[in-house]
Structure formats: structure tokens, C-alpha cells
């Protein structure tokens, strides 16, 4: 996918000055803080602006609506997770693709547990299709980590078939993780996540 054809998130304008960048950062931090302590339906642009210490008008200079802010928060988390894991997982020695996949899923669950704002967005299906698509392009998101491992360690070549398999693995993983989190007690969640690892490993590596 070329740079021109990559999906663009709906931001009114890119901050070109330090003050604008500070405003965007304040909005994202405020949204994350609110999501960590309030139900999503109680988080709106008025509350986000108040939490950020700015006017609603200043918020709308950079974000057209609440969904754009939620997407920006989610994408930042996904990019942070990928960057963090790239420094760890892609430099470690794994005996198999299944082992790498299992560690990647464990790390993602740990990240969800440590970031309640992202957990609300990711498990509740509150990320727009456009934002999710931005994280399925080659090299982005968890699929990018899987792709890099398969290329470097397993000698798999890029192809449209690989693209499709990775997208299906990510889609399946996201839905089953949300399903796992809906289960009680926690032991049932762990069983589902372990079965998910086996299922995806068979699909990707057998």
C-alpha cells in the first residue's frame, strides 16, 4: 500500500507549532484519564476539554468529534505497543512461530491490563473501522510484528496471501480476546486465551 493510499484518521488539522502539539497531547491525555475512571458513554468532548484545561473550541480545532479523539488514543496505544515489543520480541530467540505468537499474545494482554483506557476501546469495539484499518497495513500493529518475525526467522515472503492470513489472525484474535474478557471467573478467560494461542498457531504456522 502506498503512502498516498494509506488510511488517514479524521483530524481537522495537524499541529505545526509547539502550542498546537501541546493542545493535542493534552486532549489525548485527558481522554485517556477519563476513560480510566468513567464509562465511555459519560466521556464527551465537553468533559475532555475541561479535563485538558482548554476550551471546547480549542479542542475542535484539531478533532472533529469524540470518535476522532478515541481513535487517536487507540492508535497511539497500538503504535506504542508495537514499538515496545519490537525492541523485545524481535531480538529474542524463539524456538518456533507458536512460541513467538504465544509471547506476543501474553504481552498484549499485559498491555491491556496496564492501560484501562485502551482496554475499554479495544474490547468494547469503540475503535472506528478507519483507525483499525490503519493498523492492519504492512508493518503496523501486532500484525507487523508477526510479519517481521515470519520474514526474518521463518523465511516467509511478503504476499497478498500473507496479508490476508495476518488480517484474519488479528481479527480473530481481537474478537476472541474480547470474548475471553467477558467470561467469569478469570480461570475461564485463561482457558480461552490458551486455546486462542493454539488455534492461531495452527492457522499461521502448520
Image (cartoon, rainbow, N blue to C red):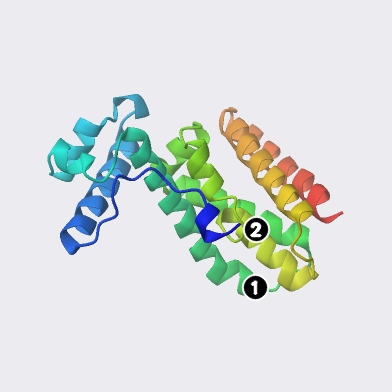
**Could you tell me residue 194's position as x and y percent?**
71, 44
**Relative height, residue 10 to residue 185 (above, below):** below
Viewer-proximal residue among 31 and 161: 161
> How many dots with numbers?
2
* Residue pictured at 54% horizontal, 71% vertical: 87
Residue extending furthest toward the front = 4
Callout 2: 10 Å neighbours few (<14), some, many (20+)? some
Horizontal side of 126 relative to 89 (left or right) equals left
Callout 1: 10 Å neighbours few (<14), some, many (20+)? few
* Residue pictured at 75% horizontal, 49% vertical: 165
Q: Quadrant of the N terminus?
A: bottom right
Residue extending furthest toward the right = 206
Residues at discs 2 and 1 in contact (Cβ within 8 Å): yes
Horizontal side of 109 relative to 127 (left or right) equals right
Numbered badge on residue 103: 2
**Relative height, residue 82 to residue 201 (above, below):** below
**Could you tell me residue 56's position as x and y percent?**
16, 36
Quarter of the figure with residue 181: top right
Label 1's element? loop
**Could you tell me residue 33's position as x and y percent?**
28, 43
Viewer-proximal residue among 151 and 58: 58
* Residue pictured at 78% horizontal, 52% vertical: 161
Closer to the chain start, of discs 2 and 1, is 1
Horizontal side of 83 relative to 22 (left or right) equals right
Quarter of the figure with residue 10: top left
Numbered badge on residue 155: none
* Residue pictured at 65% horizontal, 45% vertical: 170
**Could you tell me residue 52's position as x and y percent?**
18, 44
Numbered badge on residue 92: 1
Q: Quadrant of the C terminus?
A: bottom right
Viewer-proximal residue among 18 and 10: 10
Compute the Cα span from label 2 to label 1.
11 Å
Amino acid at each position: 500500500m502506498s503512502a498516498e493510499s494509506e488510511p488517514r484518521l479524521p483530524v481537522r488539522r495537524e499541529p505545526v507549532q509547539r502550542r498546537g502539539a501541546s493542545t493535542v497531547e493534552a486532549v489525548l491525555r485527558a481522554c485517556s484519564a477519563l476513560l480510566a475512571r468513567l464509562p465511555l458513554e459519560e466521556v464527551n468532548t465537553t468533559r475532555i476539554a475541561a479535563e485538558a484545561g482548554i476550551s471546547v473550541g480549542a479542542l475542535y480545532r484539531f478533532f472533529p468529534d469524540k470518535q476522532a479523539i478515541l481513535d487517536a488514543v487507540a492508535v497511539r496505544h497500538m503504535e506504542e505497543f508495537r514499538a515496545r515489543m519490537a525492541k523485545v520480541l524481535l531480538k529474542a530467540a524463539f524456538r518456533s512461530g507458536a512460541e513467538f505468537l504465544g509471547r506476543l499474545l501474553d504481552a498484549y494482554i499485559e498491555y491491556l491490563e496496564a492501560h484501562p483506557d485502551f482496554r475499554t476501546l479495544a474490547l468494547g469495539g469503540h475503535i472506528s473501522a478507519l483507525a483499525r484499518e490503519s493498523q492492519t497495513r504492512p508493518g503496523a500493529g501486532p500484525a507487523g510484528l508477526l510479519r517481521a518475525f515470519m520474514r526474518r526467522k521463518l523465511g516467509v515472503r511478503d504476499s497478498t496471501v500473507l496479508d490476508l492470513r495476518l488480517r484474519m489472525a488479528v481479527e480473530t484474535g481481537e474478537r476472541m480476546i474480547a470474548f475471553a474478557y467477558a467470561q467469569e471467573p478469570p480461570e475461564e478467560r485463561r482457558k480461552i486465551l490458551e486455546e486462542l494461542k493454539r488455534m492461531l498457531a495452527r492457522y499461521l504456522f502448520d
